[in-house]
Image (tube, rainbow, N blue to C red):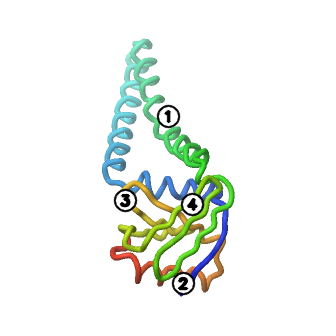
Amino acid sequence: MTFETEFELSREDFKEIVKNHVYRRSVRRIVNIIRMIIATVLGICAILMAVVGDPAWAIFFGFVCLVVVGLLIVEPILAVRSLQNTPFYQGKIRVQADDSGTRFVYGAGDSNTQWSGYIRFQETKNLFMLYVSKVMFRAISKRALRPEQVSELREMLQKKIASPGK
């Protein structure tokens, strides 16, 4: 079976990559939960200090609360921007896959990987993400595929890559 497509990753694709790759890890989730708890506690402290009548502490707790919440909002935006600025992800990406492996051709270079070089793959709503390590992956946008190509690629990945990611 041979597969070939060409596409450009969109801003929505980058957002989905960040959501499913960066924030998929349980440690990252735990850190974000802790941040939200801290922000909530500091917000409550700011309100209580304002009610009690000590505006200096209210301003301090309110400011720290805003910084913590701001980090939760800004961090994913910066991650998307970082991916968009990566030379390999700029412009057209051509993907070829056959029984021996894959070839990704980017504007900045190309990559040939045998199927044994992938440790897992993840299918999201709009992407296939093929992992060569826990942190390195190659993305294929489903937007560039016809419905039958999505099914063919899914089947190929299930056969060729030992353990699909969830």
Q: Nearer the viewer, residue 101 or 133?
A: 101
Q: Position of residue 66 (x, y in %)?
A: 48, 29
Which badge, 1 or 3, is on the more N-terminal residue?
1
Q: What's under tag 3, amino acid-wise?
A: Ser
Read off the residue under disc 3: 133
Label 3 CA crowd tier, 10 Å (few <14, some 14–19, many 20+):
few
Q: Position of residue 17 (x, y in %)?
A: 51, 57
Real-space CA distance between mark 1 and mark 4, rounded to the nearest whole angstrom: 37 Å
Q: Secondary structure at mark 3?
A: loop
Residue in the image at 34% along x and 33% along y: 41
Among the 4 quarters of the image, the one containing residue 39: top left
Which badge, 2 or 3, is on the more N-terminal residue?
3
As drawn, the label of residue 70 is: 1
Label 4 CA crowd tier, 10 Å (few <14, some 14–19, many 20+):
few
Real-space CA distance between mark 1 and mark 3, rounded to the nearest whole angstrom: 31 Å
Q: Are marks 3 and 4 in contact (CB under 8 Å)?
A: no
